[in-house]
Image (cartoon, rainbow, N blue to C red):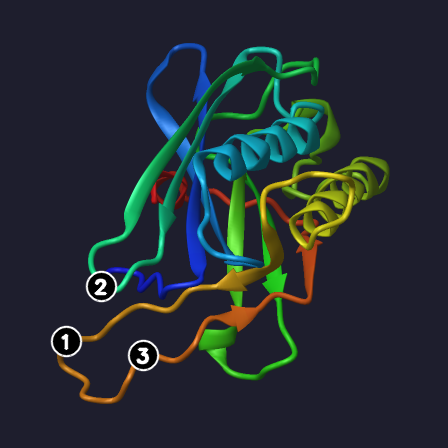
Amino acid sequence: MPKLVPPGFIDVAVKISRTGDPDLYITTFGARIITPPFTQANATALWGLVRQSFDGITGTGEVLRGITVRVGQDGDPLVMEAPGNTAGLSSGTRTPPNTAVIVSKLSSLGGRRNRGRMFWPSISEGTVDDLGLITATTLSAYQLEFDNFLIGLQGGGGFTQNTDQMVILHSTDPLNPAPTPAPTVVTGLRVEQLVGTQRRRLRR
């Protein structure tokens, strides 16, 4: 079922490539627009926030390839591209391609619908033990990056991407007559200590 992007919101796909893998890795998040319309200049500024936030945890054999932004409209969403070519700065042998760092999207509402996750591809092998647990030092470093990203997305840090909240966008259900719930505001991001191993989730 497709995610609904209502007017006043955006759905963002961050694209990452990895040496030796022909397919892109994609991780997504939603955000609320402060003052519509959301412009191409806003998309470019949002790409700057993503690049600055995550190049430090992206491997040297990986490249941040930019973002695709779907802007909510009364009809089909408007699609904007902000291409990029930023190599990662994190050294060390990376974990296998089926490994991902899991970042939980937290909200003040209960229920499965009001929870979400982001998946970040790869992490240095030396920072994950045999049980798949990230070391405390690396976990703290990742948490800082995602905390700062959320602050930026909420309008801090001097970026001009025209957003004030991260949100969880909900899927439409053609078999359910009930209206699709409004997007859920994300109150925090939590980097999980246990890595994930489902590659297919990265392709969403």
Q: Earlier in the sequence, mark 3 or mark 2?
A: 2
Task: Provide residue 142's location: percent of width, then percent of height.
Answer: 74, 39
In this rendering, the label closer to the viewer, 3 or 2: 3
Specify the farthest residue to the bottom.
178
What is the distance, in whole Å, between disc 3 and disc 2 at their CAs?
12 Å
Q: Secondary structure at mark 3?
A: loop
Circles 1 and 3, Cβ within 8 Å, touching? The answer is: no
Q: Amino acid at mark 2?
A: Met
Task: Provide residue 98's location: percent of width, then percent of height.
Answer: 44, 33
Residue 156 in the image: above or below residue 104 = above
Task: Provide residue 188's location: percent of width, then percent of height.
Answer: 70, 62
Residue 85 in the image: above or below residue 163 = above
Task: Provide residue 183's location: percent of width, then percent of height.
Answer: 46, 71
The residue nearer to you, when weighing 15 against 41, is 41
Q: Residues within 10 Å of mark 3 (few under 14, many from 20)?
A: some
Q: Secondary structure at mark 1?
A: loop
Circles 1 and 2, Cβ within 8 Å, touching? The answer is: yes
Q: Earlier in the sequence, mark 1 or mark 2?
A: 2
- Residue 173 figure quarter: bottom left
Which residue is labeled 1 in the image?
174
Q: Secondary structure at mark 2?
A: loop
What is the distance, in whole Å, between disc 1 and disc 3 at their CAs?
10 Å
Q: Amino acid at mark 1?
A: Pro
The quadrant the C terminus occupies is: top left
The residue nearer to you, when weighing 169 against 89, is 169
In the image, is 200 to the left or to the right of 47? Answer: left
Numbered circle sitting on residue 180: 3
In percent of the image, x 22 and y 63: which residue is there?
1
What is the distance, in whole Å, between disc 1 and disc 2 at their CAs?
8 Å
Q: Amino acid at mark 3?
A: Thr
Numbered circle sitting on residue 1: 2
